[in-house]
Image: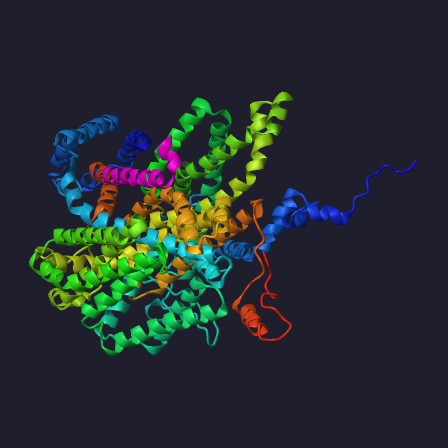
Amino acid sequence: MTDKKPVVDEQSVGQELSIEQRATVGLSQGAIVRRRFLQHRGAVVSVFVLLFLVLLAFTSVGTVIGGTGKLTPDPTGSRLIVDGFRIPGWWGFTWWERYDIVLPGGAPTFTWWPFSFGEHPFGQDNTGKDVFARVMRGMQQSLNVVFIVGIISTVIGVVLGALAGYYRGWVDQLIMRITDVIIIVPLLILGAVLGQTIGGDAFLLAVMIGLIAWTGMARLVRAEFLSLREREFVDAARVAGASDFRIIFRHILPNTVGVIVVSATLLMSAVILLETSLSFLGFGITAPDISLGQIISEYNEAFKTRPWLFWWPGLFIVIIALCINFIGDGLRDAFDPRQKRVPRQRGLGSEIGNFFKAYIPGTRPGDGTVNK
Amino acid sequence: MLTFVARRLVATLLVLLVASFIVYVLTANSGDPLRELRGSRDPSAQDQIAYLSGLLNLDQPPVLRYFSWLGGVGACFIGQCDLGISVARGQQPVIEAIGGALGSTLQLVLAATILAIVIGVAIGMTTALRQYSGYDYVVTFLTFVFYSLPIFWVAVLLKEFGAIQFNSFLGDPVIPWWSILIIGLVMGFIASSVVGGELRTRVISFVSVGGGIAALLILLDVTRWFESPSIGFVGIALMSIATGAVVLFTSTGFHNRRALLAVGIIVVLTVILSWPFQFLFYYVNSPWTVLLVLAIMVGLGLLVGFFVGGDGKAVVARTTAIVGGLGIIPLVLDQMFIRWDEYVARIPLSNGVIATIGASTPAIRRVDDTWLNMLDSLTHMLLPTIALMIISLAAYTRYARASLLDVMNQDYVRTARAKGLGERTVVMRHAFRNAMIPIATIIALDFGAVIGGAVITERVFAWQAMGSLFNEGLQHIDVNLVMGFFLVTGILAVIFNVIADLLYSALDPRIRVS
């Protein structure tokens, strides 16, 4: 008896798979996604930059937990007390106290040559407050808002989108009409009205924005559910007696995770711009509390005399938003199965090479380029 | 098609109605409109509180107040608009406040949107056609950066940095050699990337475009053109020829002799007619003249195209009409620059030519002169429009690139290529039109972002426009003022939606059939 085990010629198997399939054969979904993500250089760098910024913001000036972080005057003296438990940081200054002005006008003490940070590297404002500490605290608040909004909006958007897409009918109609009503009002306008209502607290503002920023997510998840619910594995689950809850959350939802992750990331980059814009207008986080937009708003008039009050907060907003956008782009590339590999760089250099090769006997132009 | 648009219009209006209720109630609950008065020690404060409470019906719940407000809006259909009064603005009727504010916001929003669409689609398409080139990578990176820019930061930078730099440049217009070099190199790089092809072609396009622009800048510098800018006969001729060449290149190509001839005729006509039009512009000083001239030019274009076009009448007439319509731009610019010195003499000296505050110069507004006012709006609108445009620009660029890439990989594009059609015909006729379908839907979606951006931009540049209605209204919990703003932007949103739907159904025949 000969062994009936089919002989698999590796060569012939490989030929039937496309290049993309061959690159991922035998890997789990997670491994494929991770590998693709790590190939996106911008996204990987952005992850590290963002982590560095989060660490910098929270460790430098310390933070406040278990309280609102509001500043109230000490009944006995002129000092201000922070509401909540304060964890100190390694930076010597706080964001609310005034210090002696080191350089005239509070100019930054940071110098490139000789390289030194000095006492107040980002400068001081007109009352002597340390701008570095303020920017760090502002960054904490802005990042807090971004993450809280990201979580709340994602949860609401996913649940509503899943319900609308799975049940269709009147549930879908109702949820989608609510979405339409929220979408037609510009997000900044709705956010400003809600921000004015709650009056300047960072946490409440984040909750409020979270309650209105889920619409895009809901639409995307609904669209995914509408197509996925017709698939065979859903029928199989239903025949096996799975409850609706189980089908939605255990069977369909894991298949939409790519869409959800990508759109949550892009939502978060929009949220940091929204929060800073609201705070700039005075309808977001306001005076005793700090955010990056609020700092720019507070020092807006001082641009001509103290430009450093304006540069740093803006720069950090741009860097954070840019990092989140890049991570979102990397995730999109990683999760998108239609993703094609980018051909190797066809720079000007190789073309100049071809140009000259054409004049050397025995070579043809075009050999050096990589075909798609 | 009409039923499609009508159905969408009704649905949007209903959604807007519900949204207005929510915004009204939320705004009314966002604070106490009489807070300042309650804190005041003025003996008459009590009387004022009682008076204003009566005036605003503050004793009623917000839901009831909403319906009386809605009644006032409904009265607009019988010509008796009543949007309430604004407490924050000394009891000015809201309708009056809107009347004074709408114009400049509309100009700003329209200019920024149109520019963003045109430039964004152009950049997005060229990057898609030259995918994975250095130009593509640079633009993709820049769109990420633009996407991440907070608009208020950009606006403040433009105001405090751009305006001052540009004004001091206009004061002493010397272009430094290095900026000529950089501009020439960048333009040459863009041109060579967009043209693409063999290295030879790339070098030629790099040198001709980069060198040409550098030479133009040197010429402008040597002749001190920026001191008193003018276009003149030669300028009009050159600009018309350039417009004609670009339009011809994108629509039919130079090998179509009839189109070439027709465009040649319309360009010559533009140059010849510029002389009588100059007098027309000068003596009949009204915005309608501009529209009249536009109509004449487009009409002439259609006529020329019709008679010269031969077999391809429709295509040639469309091309010449576009050339004729665009030909009005150098004419208007020329007329504006003729009045430049007069304008500079009339504005306050301290401001500089590029204004950073307000939407117009009051002294100019009082003069009933179309051209001076046009120049004035232009110098005031320049920076806010750029600020507002940058954000949308990134979005349109990305969508246009993705959309065209998607379409270029479709089977029908391969079929078109296989038939032996030229690359231009494939891109412009077969791919472009289909690639625009998703863009049409984004116009409506992007509108909310533009309105939000306008509120911020107007705040930075201290415009007394719709944005300030919202800012003031919300700060003082002046519900009527906020709702005035919301009503106008809501109607604008509906209009944008309808435009998007019309474009959509014009581009996608499937909508028209069903």
Where is residue A356? Give x, y as percent: 56, 74
In this rendering, the count of numbered labels is: 0
Asked if the stretch drawn in magenta spans residue A307, the answer is no
Magenta range is B487-514
Question: What residue lies at 50% left-to-right and 45% top-to-bottom?
Answer: B410
The prevailing secondary structure element of the residues shown in magenta is helix
Q: Quadrant of the N terminus of chain B?
A: top left
Question: What residue lies at 9% left-to-right and 62% top-to-bottom?
Answer: B279
Where is residue B438? Give x, y as percent: 40, 43
| In this rendering, position of residue A210 left or right of residue B262 | right
Where is residue A209? Give x, y as percent: 40, 40
Quadrant of residue B320 within the rendered picture: bottom left
Establish if B285 lies above or below A257.
Answer: below
Along the line of sight, the residue nearer the viewer: B2 or A204 = B2
Question: From this viewpoint, is residue A282 visible?
Answer: no
Question: What residue lies at 59% left-to-right and 73% top-to-bottom?
Answer: A357
Asked if the stretch drawn in magenta spans residue B499, the answer is yes
| In this rendering, position of residue B361 left or right of residue A273 | left
| In this rendering, position of residue A213 left or right of residue B294 | right
Establish if B475 lies above or below A162.
Answer: below
Where is residue B426? Give x, y as percent: 44, 51
Quadrant of residue B342 within the rendered picture: bottom left
Along the line of sight, the residue nearer the viewer: B124 or B295 = B295
Question: From this viewpoint, is residue B180 visible?
Answer: yes
Q: Quadrant of the C terminus of chain B?
A: top left
Establish if B89 lies above or below B397.
Answer: above
State the residue lying farthest toward the right. A1
